[in-house]
Amino acid sequence: MGTTTLLRLATAGSVDDGKSTLVGRLLHDSKNVLVDQFAAVERASADRGLDGADLALLTDGLRAEREQGITIDVAYRYFATAERSFILADCPGHVQYTRNTVTGASTADVVVLLVDVRHGVLEQTRRHLAVAALLHVPHVIVAVNKVDLVDWDEATYRSVEADVQALAAGLGIAQGLHTIPVSALLGDNIVDRSTNTPWYDGPALLELLEQLPSGEPAPTGTFRFPVQTVIRPQSGAVDPQHVEYRGYAGQVAAGTIAVGDAVTVLPSGRTSTVVGIDLAWTELDSAHAGQSVTVRLADDIDIARGDVLVSSHDAPQPVREIEAVVTWLSDRPLTPGARYDVKHLTTTVKGIVSEVNGRLDLHELAPAPATSLELNDIGRVRIKLAAPLATEDYATSRRTGAFLLIDAHDGATVAAGMIRDRFDGTLR
């Protein structure tokens, strides 16, 4: 197909800003919709009394979503052009489902944030930009939608653009910000540049998505390898030469590893040397970030799921306490003294929230005093751990710096956290 790179993107925005319509238009105009899919959308649109196909129905797949006209769950779509392939997460806009937006944006290389040109920057716009800043999403595209409803007026668009740029600057994400005037309903500046906006000389949305740097993991850097499972075939289960095989399987989270490299096992601190790297019984000389492999070591060390193999020359110090920014996702408030399971990489340990040190004021973009966090609040906390974790600052590594707080009683995820070794007044 000619595609060479993968880009992960997520859409966000307030209710009725046109996210699902934009995604449907993007899929339709880039010729990524099958005939039977489009026929089903036409039938569903006719049932609702519409004259034409409602492209929003291409992503609003749940019956409740179609009946209410809103997005509730994260809808994932896969499509490709001649330039690259894409994984798209269409996230909900309603404040009640901000937790789903955090989920969709957590692995994104690009967030496409929609803003209704008639309404400008709203509270959800601020919240979604703050989430993008917290998650260190490399690129943010603000699609200023429905410009057809203001007669393609440049001044109205520029006013919204200025507000968005000021907000992004306050959050520390101005460098990766792009703005585009679009009409998702009519298709202007979605796949092709529009003649209705002669005052805009930038690329259409799809053009920009094809041009942005690939979000694939960098092959170089500090080696980090969370162990998912220990591979020890039993006698007769595989070829006899592999009966004594012992390897540690997982995905390389960062950096590269090669046969002969010295590694340290965390949190124990034991060291060894890599003697083999296997991929489906094929031996490799090296492996890099993003690859799922099995690593064999020279020494028989007690290693289990949840341990982390790291480069010996720059192994982080395991900690029993972390300071972090969290997005609170539960209806029950977070208060000091609350106990949760802390899921980090492939391990889970008990933890207690010892302090709540304030929350982010979305209007002032500044810390505000707080001793508890409510649903959708973004705040600073300190957590004491029952066992040491090999953590790093989220700014250094999105993989090793992220964690979840889980309610042990019902298994619900109550917070998404980003570890911060220091706080400088910004979310970056």
Image (cartoon, helix red, strand yellow):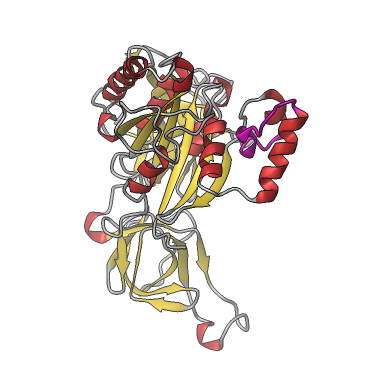
Residue at x 63%, y 51% (from the top left corner): 34
Please, which residue is most extreme toward the bottom here? Answer: 240
Q: Position of residue 36 (x, y in %)?
A: 70, 49
Where is residue 238, by image quadrant? bottom right
Where is residue 296, by image quadrant? bottom left
Is residue 52 a member of the stretch shown in magenta?
yes
Q: Position of residue 266 (x, y in %)?
A: 36, 55
**251, 56: nearer the viewer:** 56
295 in relation to 251, above or below: below
What is the span of residues highlighted in magenta in the rendered image? 48-62
Q: Is residue 414 visible?
A: no
**333, 302: nearer the viewer:** 333
Q: Is residue 48 left or right of residue 119?
A: right
Residue at x 66%, y 25% (from the top left corner): 69
Q: Main secondary structure of the magenta part?
A: loop
Count of numbered marks: 0
Is residue 36 a member of the stretch shown in magenta?
no
Q: Position of residue 333 (x, y in %)?
A: 53, 19
373 in relation to 410, above or below: above
**168, 142: nearer the viewer:** 142
Please, which residue is most extreme toward the right here? Answer: 47
Residue at x 33%, y 21% (from the top left corner): 161
Q: Is residue 89 visible?
A: yes
Q: Position of residue 349 (x, y in %)?
A: 49, 42
Quarter of the picture containing the C terminus is top left
258 in relation to 318, above or below: below
